[in-house]
């Protein structure tokens, strides 16, 4: 049994006139049912609620205030799920709506509840259809794009495959050549954005890189050719492949890709080098603290020239670490007046930026 996450965007689901492409949804349901019937478990991450809402409300101006957009998403989500229910009914597959926000991943308890709900749905034989809860999301709490949501969901679920379906055949390098396997030194050709989607190829690349780092075989491919999904699993080059690298464990994956940060620590060159060599961060290496956070919160760690080194779990609150920043362990304990940890962020609780 394989665990497969498929993300389909608005530019595949919505026709040029703004109406939902029902024929495409039927074919998508047929292909995903084929995986399901072979004993695999499938999660569909679907955009399209906003576009469906505009269609129902007969709106043509996409530059609406946030509260109108949220209301249209509430209208459109109902229509979208009605259509999904109908097309999957053709293949006797039951579906469930799964609306989530970024905070559901950031908070460890909510994240575990999310996973338990997913496990329950799959055990009962329901195919989950996931979307961001756009009716309550704001710029500060949103994923920004469902490619990111799909990657975070794949990491949280520990899926085997992640498909980010696009309207193009994959990734094109600056010479115009299609890339079969992505590597981090590749220079890409810039492509124009389109229509209803909120992301772009760079967003898809970041999402696929994140998933591949934790052992998920990922692919950006043309979603208009849905036979690509099975071809990819069979090993064919049908899009841009991001090989499963499995370079970090699940705890660091949650820190790096799922958690949200509460503050910032700026460190000196010595601490920067130590972190890059997988050493722990000590108070003596801290130059500046920004924001207010508590013990156990996730914080970003920046070099003194402003580049992000990574992020990790703090063993101090912001008040404590401000008092002892730049001090060695014994002086730090004396400054605080009580026995305290010698390590600000332990190496086991730190995720390094690629």
Image: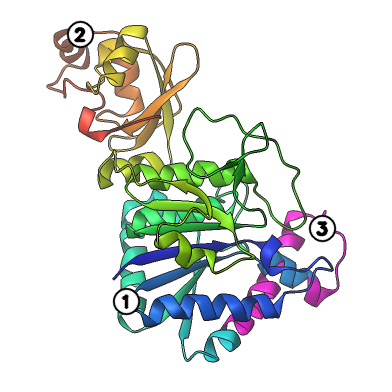
Question: Which of the colour schemes (rainbow, by chain, secondary structure, one colour) is used?
Answer: rainbow
Q: Residue 200 appears at what percent x and percent y?
A: 65, 46
Distance between the Cα atoms at labels 1 and 2? 49 Å
Disc nearest the viewer among 2 and 3: 3
Which residue is the site of mark 2?
Answer: 328
Q: Is residue 256 left or right of residue 89?
A: left
Q: Which residue is mark 1?
A: 120
* Camera-side residue of 76 and 90: 90
Q: Can residue 23 be found in the magenta stretch?
A: no
Query: Which x, y percent locates residue 220?
Result: 54, 52
- Which label's residue is closer to the chain start, 2 or 3? 3
Within 10 Å of the Cα at label 1, are there few (<14), some (14-19), or many (20+) other Cα atoms? few
Q: Secondary structure at mark 1?
A: helix
Q: Which mark is residue 62?
A: 3
Residue at x-position 34% and y-position 41%: 255
Q: Could you tell me if the residues under marks 1 and 2 are in contact, i.e. CB atoms within 8 Å?
A: no
Q: Are marks 1 and 3 in contact (CB under 8 Å)?
A: no
Q: Quadrant of the N terminus?
A: bottom left
């Amino acid at each position: 049994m394989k665990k497969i996450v498929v993300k389909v965007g608005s530019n595949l689901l919505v026709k040029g006139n703004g109406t939902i492409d029902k024929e495409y949804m039927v074919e998508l349901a047929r292909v995903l049912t084929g995986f399901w019937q072979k004993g695999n478990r499938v999660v569909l991450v679907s955009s399209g609620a906003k576009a469906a809402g505009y269609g129902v409300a007969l709106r043509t101006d996409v530059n609406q205030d946030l509260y109108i957009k949220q209301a249209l998403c509430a209208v459109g989500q109902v229509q979208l799920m009605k259509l999904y229910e109908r097309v999957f009914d053709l293949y006797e597959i039951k579906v469930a709506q799964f609306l989530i926000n970024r905070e559901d991943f950031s908070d460890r308890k909510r994240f575990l509840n999310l996973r338990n709900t997913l496990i329950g749905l799959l055990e009962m034989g329901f195919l989950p259809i996931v979307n961001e809860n756009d009716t309550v999301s704001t710029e500060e709490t949103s994923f920004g794009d469902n490619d990111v949501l799909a990657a975070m969901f794949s990491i949280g679920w520990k899926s085997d495959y992640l498909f980010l379906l696009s309207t193009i055949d994959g990734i094109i390098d600056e010479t115009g050549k299609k890339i079969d396997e992505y590597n981090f030194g590749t220079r890409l050709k810039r492509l124009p954005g389109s229509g209803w989607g909120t992301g772009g190829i760079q967003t898809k690349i970041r999402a696929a890189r994140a998933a591949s780092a934790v052992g998920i075989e990922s692919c950006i491919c043309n979603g208009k050719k849905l036979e690509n999904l099975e071809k990819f699993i069979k090993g064919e080059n049908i899009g841009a492949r991001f090989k499963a690298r499995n370079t970090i464990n699940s705890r660091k994956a949650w820190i790096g890709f799922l958690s949200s940060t509460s503050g910032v620590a700026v460190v000196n060159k010595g601490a920067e080098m130590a972190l890059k060599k997988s050493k722990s961060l000590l108070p003596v290496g801290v130059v500046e603290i920004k924001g207010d956070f508590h013990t156990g919160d996730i914080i970003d760690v920046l070099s003194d020239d402003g580049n992000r080194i990574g992020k990790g779990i703090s063993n101090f609150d912001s008040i404590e670490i401000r008092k002892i920043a730049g001090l060695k362990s014994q002086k730090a304990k004396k400054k605080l007046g009580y026995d305290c940890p010698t390590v600000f962020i332990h190496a086991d609780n730190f995720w390094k930026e690629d």
